[in-house]
Image (cartoon, rainbow, N blue to C red):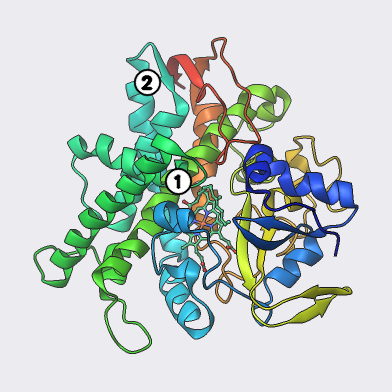
Amino acid sequence: MPAEEGLDHSLAFLKEGYLYITNRTLGFQSDVFETRLLGERAICMRGEEAARLFYDEDKFIRFGAAPKRVIKTLFGENGVQTLDGEAHRHRKAMFMSLMSDEAMQRMRGLTRKYWEIAAKNFETRKEVEIYEEAKELLCRVACEWAGVPLEPEEVREKTSWFGALFESPASIGITYMKGRNARTKAESWISGLIEDVRTNRFTAPEHSALAVISFHRDLNGQLLDLKTAAVEMLNIIRPIVAVSIYIAFTALAVIQQPEEREKLAGSDEVRLGHFIQEVRRFYPFFPVTAARVAEDFVWNGYRFEQGTLTMLDLYGTNHHPDLWDKPEKFMPDRFQHWRGSPFRFIPQGGGDHDTGHRCAGEWITLEIMKESLDFLANRMSYDVPQQDLSYSFSDIPSLPHSNIVIQNVRSV
Ligand code: HEM
Ligand code: MYR
């Protein structure tokens, strides 16, 4: 296997960000290479075949794979992301049970309701930042969808906690500490609520995430301990709020791709769908996912040793020149003839939702994004003042630098 020389490349990873793996696969002319990251040997890979291998559960496990700092901020301890085998399937089924067609429609309706309220509010203000507004809007949506009570005066604080959880995992200093503090506070708040549900002091709406997670029993028939239940509640609420990053990139595409925006007039569901799929493919968001080799094996002549940390490049696979025509061009129409493949287009992970670790919230994400795109392209008029719309491949997660400022908003 091609190997990068040197003691540790974590700094290069942080510096090159979303392009770290791509840059080396180009240099080595190989979609798989070995390096050293976070003080240990690590294999990095990208592409469809690499993704197929990575999601083979006999070959890779998740226990001990996610970096500590990611656990301490983004994921939480003992959540579904860290489980393997039967325990994972059982916990994952709990998440997937929340994703019925009805639940998706409810999500769509809630997103519309809160965009309508937000758009009216934007009309009274000189200018607004789309990213910040989208976080607050989705905090309301997430809590209502999940059955979590949220008073209007709590929205600011709770939004800042959820935001800090996904803005901090790859940061240092104050931003990282904000993420750690946010996790402590958010877990303690949600644990209290789950306790109230379990002791009948609060009745969670039937079939809501709050009801399902509060009363979920593990394979031994035990309720989840309070902390783990809180971690899993946050695994629902936090990523819904994180769709705000996709909304900021959707707004960027609407602004910078006027020809593509025109095709959205009339709010055709299929066209909205192609546009947001291309947003998920094109812009950098979740960079890589991590696992460890379950047992020694050989693949394409390369030795994978038990325990080796292995990173699958999600961004690099979505931009792989062998898999995508003109990968660096924003072309929603490419999804017209897209036949689908669980290992080629993997912005939210690959493989199977029920058996593997692929994102449980992928369909929710699509619903939120389609509705939000309709507002940004068709249901509001606004001016876009001069601002820094660029984004950096070294910021993880990346975001347009200006957060997307708009002025003179009118509902249409
Ligand atoms: C897992 C991305 C939104 C819930 C994942 C994974 C990725 C991802 C990359 C891991 C895949 C892997 O390790 O193989 C994203 C992105 C989102 C998003 C970019 C956009 C904001 C959501 C939403 C929800 C959600 C809205 C829930 C409402 C989950 C859960 C897992 C997961 C529970 C763990 C699945 C498992 O370990 O089996 N997501 N996600 N995500 N996501 Fe998302
Ligand atoms: C979520 O909240 O789960 C969805 C979006 C979070 C994106 C955060 C980006 C940083 C992730 C670094 C993860 C590295 C995993 C090995």
Mark 1, Cα crowd under 10 Å, few <14 / some 14-19 / many 20+, is many
Q: Which of marks 2 and 1 precedes in the sequence?
A: 2
Which residue has dot 2 on it?
122
The secondary structure type at the circle numbered 1 is helix
**Which dot marks residue 289?**
none
- In this view, which residue lies farthest toward the left? 201
Q: How many marks?
A: 2
- In this view, which residue lies farthest toward the front? 7
Give, as a three-letter code, the residue at label 2.
Phe
In the shown orientation, is residue 133 left or right of residue 250?
A: left
Residue 62, quarter of picture: bottom right
Q: Position of residue 318 (x, y in %)?
A: 74, 50
Q: Is residue 207 visible?
A: no
Mark 2, Cα crowd under 10 Å, few <14 / some 14-19 / many 20+, is many
Residue in front for this viewpoint, 129 or 382: 129
**Which dot marks residue 166?**
1
Q: Where, quadrant-wise, is the N terminus in this rendering? A: bottom right
Label 1, ligand 2: CB separation under 8 Å: yes
Give, as a three-letter code, the residue at label 1.
Phe
Dot 1 and dot 2 residues touching (CB under 8 Å)? no
Estimate the spatial distance between the alpha carbons at disc 1 and disc 2, rounded to whole Å.
Answer: 25 Å
The secondary structure type at the circle numbered 2 is helix
In this rendering, the answer to whether 198 lies above or below 16 is below
Q: Position of residue 332 (x, y in %)?
A: 73, 40
Q: Residue at x 61, y 67 (%)?
A: 291
Q: Position of residue 159 (x, y in %)?
A: 32, 39
Residue 145, quarter of picture: bottom left
Q: Position of residue 389 (x, y in %)?
A: 60, 21
In this rendering, the answer to whether 64 lies above or below 139 is below
Q: Residue at x 35, y 49 (%)?
A: 142
In the shown orientation, is residue 212 left or right of residue 248?
A: left
Q: Is residue 50 visible?
A: yes
